[in-house]
Structures are given as structure tokens and as C-alpha cells.
């Protein structure tokens, strides 16, 4: 999208470095719950709203590259959480249910193996 907009002479202005650095810190600190500095209108914007705008902005280029489905999957990750979120949730749940740390970790590994295996199943 940026390469296309550069050719068209319609690149957006570069956001201030301070906002980029702050947004990076906010995303690292708060993850999917972050409210980022809005580089377009000022103020704050929910990370899910910012991502939805970005996905819409990138849709045409993603379609041209054959990766629109993968791009739209990012919306699901923000809505439902990432694999890391599921791993932490399972680990904490098993500890609350009385599992030892080793038992809880083994269940997390089992989850990863099953999820990875499901993604590797042949399409035929």
C-alpha cells in the first residue's frame, strides 16, 4: 500500500516519532487492551478500532496480493486473543484448579501441539 501510494504521490504524512514510540510501549504494556495515540485525528483510539481502519485501508492491496483472508484474521486475534493469551489463560486456570506448575505447563505444551498439528493437516 505504501509503495503504491508513493508511486501515486499520496503518501500520508509520517507520524511523530514520539507517538510511534509511545504506541509501541502501550501495545507492549497493555496488549489488546491498549488505547493508542491516534496519529490521524489526535487523542486516543482503541487498538481494535485502529486495526479495523488499517484493515480497510489495506484491503485492496491485500486482495491484489492474495492475502486478504490473512489480513482479516488479525481482527479475530484482537477480538479473541492470541495464542499467547490462550496459553496464559490455560496455565492460570490449571493452577487455580490445583495443578502443579509442571502439570500446567505440560497442558500448555499439549495445547500448542494440538493447535500446531491442526494447522499442518493436509488439504487433500
Image (cartoon, rainbow, N blue to C red):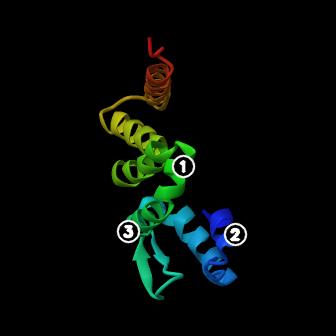
Dots 3, 1 in contact, CB < 8 A: no
Callout 1 secondary element: helix
User: How many angstroms separate mark 3 from mark 1 (CA)?
Assistant: 24 Å
User: Which of the two discs, 3 and 1, sits closer to the camera?
Assistant: 1
Q: Earlier in the sequence, mark 1 or mark 2?
A: 2
Callout 2 secondary element: helix
Eyeballing the image, is 116 above or below 70?
above
Q: Residue furthest front?
A: 8
Q: Nearer the viewer, residue 90 or 59?
A: 59
Residue visible at 48% across and 88% down in the picture: 42
User: How many angstroms separate mark 3 from mark 2 (CA)?
Assistant: 28 Å
Q: Residues within 10 Å of mark 3 (few under 14, many from 20)?
A: some
User: Residue 36: x percent and y percent?
Assistant: 48, 75
Determine the image quadrant of residue 3: bottom right
Q: Residue furthest top?
A: 124
Numbered tag placed on residue 7 in the rendering:
2
| Disc 1: which residue | 64
| Disc 3: which residue | 49
Eyeballing the image, is 103 above or below 12?
above
User: Residue 104: x percent and y percent?
Assistant: 43, 30
User: How many angstroms separate mark 1 from mark 2 (CA)?
Assistant: 16 Å
Q: Nearer the viewer, residue 72 or 16?
A: 72
Eyeballing the image, is 25 above or below 38?
above
Position of 106 with respect to 89 (left or right) is: right
Residue visible at 48% across and 57% down in the picture: 60
The N terminus is located in which quarter? bottom right
Amino acid at each position: 500500500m505504501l509503495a503504491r501510494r508513493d508511486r501515486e504521490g499520496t503518501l500520508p504524512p509520517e507520524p511523530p516519532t514520539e507517538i510511534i514510540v509511545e504506541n509501541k510501549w502501550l501495545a507492549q504494556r497493555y496488549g489488546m487492551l491498549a488505547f493508542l495515540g491516534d496519529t490521524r485525528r489526535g487523542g486516543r483510539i482503541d487498538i481494535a478500532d485502529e486495526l479495523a481502519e488499517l484493515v480497510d485501508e489495506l484491503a485492496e492491496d491485500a486482495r491484489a496480493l492474495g492475502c486478504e483472508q490473512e489480513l482479516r484474521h488479525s481482527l479475530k486475534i484482537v477480538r479473541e486473543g492470541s495464542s499467547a493469551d490462550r496459553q496464559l489463560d490455560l496455565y492460570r486456570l490449571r493452577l487455580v484448579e490445583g495443578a502443579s506448575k509442571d502439570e500446567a505447563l505440560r497442558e500448555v505444551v499439549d495445547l500448542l501441539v494440538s493447535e500446531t498439528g491442526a494447522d499442518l493437516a493436509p488439504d487433500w
